[in-house]
Every structure is written in C-alpha cells, then in structure tokens.
Amino acid sequence: MRIAVDAMGGDLGPRATVQGAASAASSDPDLEIRLFGPRRQLEDEVSCLPRLLVAAGSRLQIVDAPSVIGQGQSLSDALRHGQTTSMGRMLDSLSRGEAQAGVSAGNTGALMALSRRSLGTLPGIPRPAISTAIPTRNRGRCYLLDLGANVEASAERLVDFALMGEAMARLVDGISAPRVALLNVGVEGAKGTASVREADALLRRQSDMAYCGYVEGDGIFGGSMDVVVCDGFVGNAVLKASEGLARMLVERVQATFVAHWSSRLVGLLARPALRRLKGELDPVRYNGASLLGLAGIVVKSHGGADATGFHFALRRAVQEVRHNLPGRLAAELDQRRSAMEATPPSRFDEGSGIPGPASQDHAENHQE
Amino acid sequence: MRIAVDAMGGDLGPRATVQGAASAASSDPDLEIRLFGPRRQLEDEVSCLPRLLVAAGSRLQIVDAPSVIGQGQSLSDALRHGQTTSMGRMLDSLSRGEAQAGVSAGNTGALMALSRRSLGTLPGIPRPAISTAIPTRNRGRCYLLDLGANVEASAERLVDFALMGEAMARLVDGISAPRVALLNVGVEGAKGTASVREADALLRRQSDMAYCGYVEGDGIFGGSMDVVVCDGFVGNAVLKASEGLARMLVERVQATFVAHWSSRLVGLLARPALRRLKGELDPVRYNGASLLGLAGIVVKSHGGADATGFHFALRRAVQEVRHNLPGRLAAELDQRRSAMEATPPSRFDEGSGIPGPASQDHAENHQE
C-alpha cells in the first residue's frame, strides 16, 4: 500500500510529518510513503530520524515540490498556484494512481478545493463533507459531519451526510447498525430549520438505517449515537468550541494542582494520574478527518498535530484504503438512491433547501 | 424591589426555587419576592425553609396558580392554557407592573412565547434573543447570543443581537467598551454564510462599538471577546455541546482519581483540590439567561438549577432591574438606528437575509 503525504502543511513543520510518516511505516511493514515537499528539507528530516525509525525510513520516498500553500493563503491563489506545491503535487500523484490515499495537515479550504479538482466527487455528491470522530462519555466515539465544507446544507445534502457517515461507521469501524441522528435545537418534531425538518422526514423513510431522530448538542458526547449530522457552519462552530473548552478545562485542572498541591509528596503522587488524564482527553488519538464523498481517499490531519498525531491521521487513511471506502460508498449511495426513488411519495424534488420564513413559527426553541 | 418567580418550572421542583428565592431575599434586604404556584405546595416549602432563611421568608409572598407548564408541553398548548399556570400568572403580574422582573426555570419556548405576549418587545425588535454568560480561559466571561430563540437570523437580526449584547455587557457589567465578535467558520472575510458576511459589513460601520470581526468557536472561551453573536441554531448547538463536553470531562477527572488513587492519604489530600476544581467548572455561577429585547425583564434559569443556581438567576434579574436594562436598551437601539440611517450608503434595505446559493462559492471552509 502506498500513501502520499503533503509533508509541509502542519504548523510544526516537516519534522512532525516526516517522523509521523516513519512511525506509521514502522508499525505497518506493507506501507510505503511518498513525501511531498522541498527535497533538501525533507532529506534533512529523513536523515535525522530517531534511531528506532531509521529502518522504516527506507520506505519513505521523497518527491520534490518547491512551494507550500500557506494557512492564510486565499482559495483562488491556492487554486492558481497549486501545481508546484507539496499539497498540489501530492494530490496529482494520487489522481494518477501512484498512491491509494493522501494525507495533509495543511490549509483545509485549499485541500478541499484541490482534492475536488484532482479527484472529483462520487456520483450525485456535489461537494464532499468533512467528518471526524469525537470522543464520547462511554469511551466510544461519534462521527460528526459536516465540519465546514458546506456552510449551508439543504435537506438532500444532510441526507447525503447521514448516508456517508453511516456507511463509514459501518464499513471502516465495523459497527453493524450505526445509530444516526440529526443535530437540532430540540428533540420535538416542530423545532429547527426547514432543511433539518425535511431531512428528518426523508431519513425516517430509510428503513435499513438506524435513524434515531434529533439530538441536541450534548448528544454528540452522550455515547448513544455513532453519527451526528449537521451543516458545516454548525459542525465547525461545535468542533472548535469543543476544542477551546477542552483546552480551557485541562488548563484549569493543571492549575488547580499547581496552585494548591505545594507538598512535594502530593505533587509526585498526583503526576501519573494527571498524565493519564491528559492522555485520555488528548484529541490526538482521534486525529484525521475524512473528506467523505470524494472519488478518492484524502485525510486531513489537524494543523497542530505532532508526529504521534500525524501517525494517527496516516492510520486513518490506511484503514479507509483497506476497506475501499470510496468504492463501497459509491455503490451504497447508488443503491440507496434507487431504493428511495422507488418508494413513493418521494419528496426529493420538493423544497429548495433554503429555509423559508415559515419555519420561524416553530422557532420558540430553547436553551436547555 | 419586587421580583416575580415561577416557582414550579425547574426539574428539581419548588423546593429549589423557594429556597433559592429565600436565599436571594436573605442576601438583599430590599428584595421582595412573589412566588407563583399551587398555594398549598408553596406554603409547605416556605414552612420548611432552613433556619438561616426563615427571616427572609417573611419577604416571600405566595400567589396561587393551580397549574404548571410541562417541559414537553407544546407551544400552542402552553399559549392556550397559559393563564392559569405559574409561568403565565407570573408574567401577567409582571405586565401589570406588580413586579420589576420575572424569573422562571421552566420550558424555554413557552417562557419566550408567553413573555412576548404579556410584555411585548422593544421597538424594532421582532423577537427577543436569549443570552447567557460563558466562562472564559482568563476567568472572565463572554455573552453568547442567540441561544435558540431565532433558529435563523438575517444580517439585521445579527446586528440587533450585537447591539443588545454590547449594551448589556456595558450597562450591567460595567465594561466600558465591550469587544464584540461574529461567530464564523474562519476569520477571513470571504468565509461564512451571506447573512454573517452582511452583518460583518454592517457592524464595521458602527464607529462607537468595539467590533472585532469574526471569531471561530474556540474564540468564545478565549477571553478576548465580551460578546459573541450567532444565530440561535448555532448558539444552541454550541452551548449544549459545551455543557455535554464539560460534564464528560468532569466525570473523567473524577474517574481518574477514583480509579488510581486508592491510597487513603492521597484521596484525602486530593479531595479539597478536586472540590475547588468542580466549583470552578460549575456553570451555576453563571446561571440566568436574559431574554434580551423584551419590553421587560425576564430571566431564564437552567431547568436543572438547584437552590444556589436559582439564587444566581434571581441576582441576574436584580442587576438588570438596578440598571434599568430594557429602558436603556430601547433608548440606545433607537439612537443607533437613527445614526445608522443617517450614514450612507445604507445597506439595511438590501438582502433578505436568507443566504443565497452564491455563498457556497466561499464555502471551502475549514476544520481547524
């Protein structure tokens, strides 16, 4: 198996991505990795790999790409000048079939746009959705999508997200009947926007899906759902707010013990427990967001991921290759669409998906 | 000062609300409280107040209201039968000027609808927004709004939320120039929905407001903003997801010490620090969401609030009365609107606020 890696995208520079790639190769003897970036710089990083990873280094191949897409670079600029960048060349290599999956920690907007241009989308999917696994209360996980690729989503797009998220949980994670919910501002039928209510009606007709109706925001972490669906604006706000809150709470936990546990004995005793705790809350273990609906496998690593985090993003890509995710997804989407079209009364042609003012009548929603 | 209290709404029953009311009265000798609910039941609760609160009990007046609006009750049902309920009678008393503010821990949708019917809204505000203070990283707080009253919001409504939130932070909390931001999926100009981008353009013209542009979800907790504005769907999802995540993390912290700190010495030593930590993360201290834009003061307590939490919601109401929030808000909104209308080029008449498909072109947004 060969994975193409944009070695230049992350906030921590190529050391983290090259070490993460070597670590992934080291744990999987069938894995070859093509690293895209300025040759000199990547050669330097490979030459100073930690001793344990040197053997795996022989399965890292460097492909020169002189330039890099910056985090703040505009989309049009990235699309115009993408060809010579580490991200652009990585995706071109993927589109030529030289690798089965691509991984980047770079600019998400650029990755989405360049991936669509290089690889295209699955039939009937106008734009991919971004999804990542969120840790849950019962130490499981829940896929949340979309996380920002589609800032507005019609009912039909929300249904696509549900179908793709459900298929991913089933095909990649082996959950036999993933529980799927729509994110809403209440659990009763009359709440929410027109597109969410219309998507609910459409999903209720999916007889072979464990669709569970609405959840509110806390339902993402509750452990009773495997997939939670929302538009990209909401998903992005929820994900980033959660990251910010988790960071704040971990800081508070640490500050509590620093401020009050002056006794050396207690400090020593507390340390291992605090380390375990930080590990448990560490989002690194879930690093790697999938661009679902692309006609190929591209995984987005968190920009701030270290070598371990990048290793996990690579493993996510390997899993999706092993399960042939895009191929099976395309087949399932096709099958489900035929089934839906065969079931009257079809509401698929109704509604623009743009919520009308009527839905404000149902908008006496609540806060707790 | 007199506050009207719906004693029946909370999940914990009237004991929590009656004790919370007595505790608020006890800490403020000028405060009188009218408790609405079934007379017998409330008399029982008043008669068994803790000894420390008995003296304050003489400033609690019971007003009989035979029925209660349930958490799951439909809006139309609540509107039809509201007159005999503790919430409905509390609001009617408020509208007759028998109290200066109302507090309820009941069904938020019903509270919003009945409040609008009883009190009306400020000129130019079609529907109130719900706002609550969120704890921030630097131990400050940030008002987030709307939290669910307006599941969709045009640019003009988002601007109203910003004006009202800013005024609240300034008038009630005494912040001289509250920093205001719009929640978005990125900080660059071309990102987000049409209504968010249009609201950004309108807010940039507010020369006497410290408008800081966009923040992403983590910006709510970052401590660099005093007011963050979004539509009610996003705000509700973010607030509830944050509540769910905070609960999960506190559970994990406790489990870490329960599982590994078997030694009695360490357990004893850890206890005070953990208690302090739990107190710091306790949302009770920020309990009390304001219904901003109402022509009167109504504070929504969290449904699960205990007596201490309810006490804080009452204090929130007292503060808003002291600062004459609705009156000053009406004057400021009026003034700002005149100023805006005087400043060409006005964009206030453009745009339906319903995002068009064009905004999808800007939608290559990102996840981190």
Image (cartoon, coloured by chain):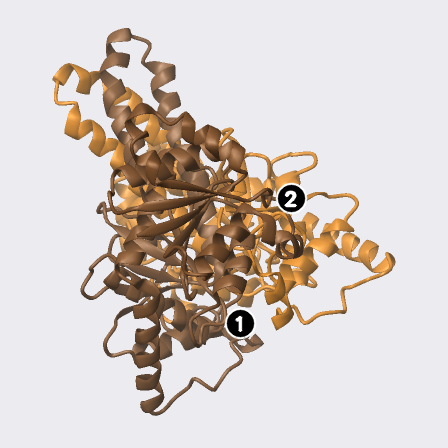
Chain colours: A orange, B brown
Horizontal side of A270 relative to B50 (left or right) equals left
- Of helix, strand and loop, which one carries label 1? helix
- Residue under mark 1: which chain is it in? B
Q: Residue at x 24, y 63 (%)?
A: B170
Q: Quadrant of residue A311?
A: top left
Residue A127, image x, y percentages: 59, 64
Horizontal side of B131 relative to B303 (left or right) equals left
**A43 and A208: which is toward the camera:** A208
Task: Return the residue at label 1.
Answer: B360
Q: Is residue B75 above or below residue A242?
A: below
**B343 and A288: which is toward the camera:** B343
Residue A248, image x, y percentages: 29, 42
Count residues near mark 2 (Cα–Cα under 10 Å), then give few for <14, some for 14-19, many for 20+: many
Horizontal side of A325 relative to B245 (left or right) equals right
Of the 4 image quadrants, the one containing the C terminus of chain B is bottom left
Horizontal side of A261 relative to A214 (left or right) equals left
Q: Please state which amino acid type lies under the numbered disc 1.
A: Gln
- Residue under mark 2: which chain is it in? A
Count residues near mark 1 (Cα–Cα under 10 Å), then give few for <14, some for 14-19, many for 20+: some
Task: Return the residue at label 2.
Answer: A180
Q: Is residue B60 above or below residue A148?
A: above
Q: Is residue A237 above or below residue B197?
A: above
Dot label at residue B324: none
Residue A320, image x, y percentages: 58, 44
Q: Residue at x 32, y 90 (%)?
A: B342
On the same chain: label 1 and label 2?
Answer: no
- Of helix, strand and loop, which one carries label 2? strand
Residue B309, image x, y percentages: 37, 38
CA distance for labels 1 and 2 = 26 Å
**B255 and A5: which is toward the camera:** B255
